Amino acid sequence: MSRYPSELLTLMGFLKQLPGVGARTAERFAFQLLTWQPGQLHLFAELLGSLHDKIKHCQACGCLIDGSDCHFCDKDKRDGTILCIISSAKDALSLENTRAYKGLYHVIGGLLSPLDGRSLEQLGLEQLQERLASLEVKEIIIALDSTLEGDATSLYLKEQLEKWGFSASRLAFGLPLGSSLDFVDGGTLSKALTGRQRF
Ligand SMILES: [Zn+2]
């Protein structure tokens, strides 16, 4: 028999699924949550339960939308001739923070990772192709992580884009292999963006 009540173990199991949270931290978080007021815990639980209803992805670009309009697809404010392919909606926010990019985005579902069973179908390439046909994009930037999976996905995308008649550039990282966009500071990302290179 465990020393912990089973609900607490379950809670720790959930917390451990968060990035960077190991068993010790999960335990600390769980005990911290136990000290919260019941009302606060209810609000937290309610928010978690409704995350998918409240926070939506734009049907066109895949970025997160606030309300009904997509800020990232706004024709009046964005440069419709340039499109940046990213792996997660979060990357759009990182790139926005650099203030060096005003074009469109397209979120693919993730990176190719045969080991994790993520395959070509999950990149949503048909949707990308359809979207490109409806836009007037002249330049495509592939902004994926500088990791093995990121590189493999970038190469594959580049080949696909060429088949569809587009050429692409890639962020000039100047970063060690294994860098995820998540961990790149704004200055480095801004430089990587302006120094982008043709494949
Ligand atoms: Zn959008």
Image: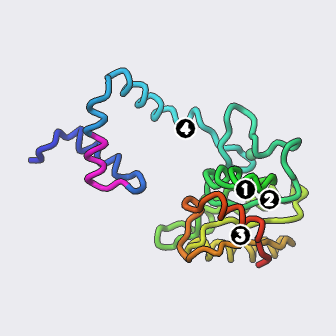
Q: Which tag is nearer the camera, tag 2 or tag 3?
A: 3
Q: Do the residues labelled 2 and 4 touch (CB within 8 Å)?
A: no
Q: Are marks 1 and 4 in contact (CB under 8 Å)?
A: no
The kind of residue on which mark 1 rests is His
The kind of residue on which mark 3 rests is Leu
Q: In which quarter of the image is ligand 1?
A: top right
Q: What element carries label 3?
A: loop
Using the image as rendered, state which of residue 84 and residue 49 is in the foreground. 84
Name above or below for residue 184 compared with residue 152.
above
Q: What element carries label 1?
A: strand
Residue topped by disc 4: 52
Q: Are marks 2 and 1 in contact (CB under 8 Å)?
A: yes
Q: What stretch is highlighted in magenta?
A: 21-30
Residue topped by disc 3: 171
Residue topped by disc 1: 106
Name above or below for residue 193 compared with residue 20.
below
Identity of the residue furthest to the front in this view: 187
Dot 1 or dot 4: first in sequence order is 4
Residue 115 lies, in percent from the top left, at: 47, 72
**Residue at the (27%, 30%) spot, across then down:** 35
Spatial distance from mark 2 to mark 4, Cα to Cα?
Answer: 26 Å
Q: Which tag is nearer the camera, tag 3 or tag 1?
A: 3
77 left or right of 97 in image: right
Using the image as rendered, state which of residue 159 and residue 37 is in the foreground. 37
